Image (cartoon, rainbow, N blue to C red):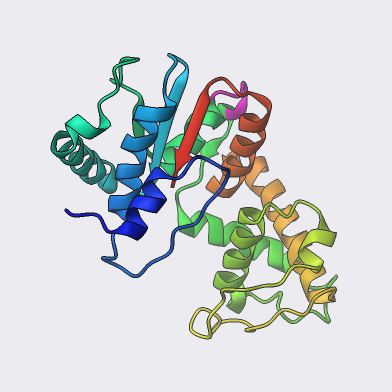
Amino acid sequence: MELNLEQKKLIQASPAGQGLVKGVAGSGKTTVALHRALFLRRYYCLTPQDRLLLVTYNRTLINYLAHLYDKIEEEYKDYYQNIFSDQEDKVEIQNIDSIMYQYCIAQKGRLAYKLLFDKDVASSVLSECIGELSKKYAQARILDERNVSFLMDEIIWIKACHYLEIEEYQGADRLGRSSQQSKDGPQKLLKNSETRKAIFELMQLYDRKLKEKGYLDFSNINIMALHYAKENKEKNIIILL
């Protein structure tokens, strides 16, 4: 595949913190990421400790990306060859959930809990929590079993944003919830409201109930993995998402 000028600029840019490449399906984002990995491998992986991590979102894509990576590497072998260090095993391709799980099991005692995969169990625990809090927040009509799906999505969103304090959630702009997604709940949650307070306390109760039953969900694993990664930097890693 012939790269255009804009793609070459993205591939050959010096590492400078986070970056975001946007484009419609088929515009070449994956191709750019793979070329970027090979470029960084050649020019920035010069010591045994240096690594590149290419992250995707499911297991199926790992094999697909590995195939494309090998194909591009072979096609551009003269360009991306590095004479200063062994380039084998410099680039690792993983999916995000497996990375989170690896960080989780690296923390002693975390495996005392089972990973929660069963959505029916999650919904049942959340319904139980709604029942316990509905009287306390009688004015917050959102706490209704008919809104279980909406509330579960909101809890996942709160954790994904890493809002660990009520003040963070109360002041956050809630973006990305379409009318289709909100058919079983409100399309807008007012800031600094009793409704948000109720949802945040619901999340806290839900987490406690899960642990009492011996479970951890993936949202909590992601938070624990983030904390562990910040406190335990072991390698020089450049991450491509």
Does the magenta stretch mainly form a helix, a strand or a loop? Answer: loop
What's the magenta region?
A: 106-110
Q: Is residue 193 left or right of residue 10?
A: right
Number of numbered discs: 0
Q: Position of residue 1 (x, y in %)?
A: 16, 53
Residue at horizontal 58 percent and vertical 43 percent from the top: 17
Q: 155 and 190: which one is in front?
A: 190
Q: 1 and 241: which one is in front?
A: 1
Residue at horizontal 73 percent and vertical 55 percent from the top: 163
Q: Is residue 83 magenta?
A: no
| Quarter where residue 123 is shown | bottom right
Residue at horizontal 48 percent and vertical 29 percent from the top: 102
Single out the residue that lies furthest toward the front: 5
Q: Position of residue 22 (x, y in %)?
A: 43, 64
| Quarter where residue 160 is shown | bottom right
Q: Is residue 108 left or right of residue 54?
A: right
Q: 40 and 204: which one is in front?
A: 40
| Residue 57 in view here | no
| Quarter where residue 215 is shown | top right
Residue at horizontal 71 percent and vertical 78 percent from the top: 142
Q: Position of residue 143 (x, y in %)?
A: 71, 74
Q: Is residue 75 left or right of residue 51?
A: left
Q: 28 and 4: which one is in front?
A: 4
| Residue 221 in view here | yes
Residue 42 lies, with reference to residue 130, above or below; the image says above
Q: Position of residue 95 (x, y in %)?
A: 38, 42
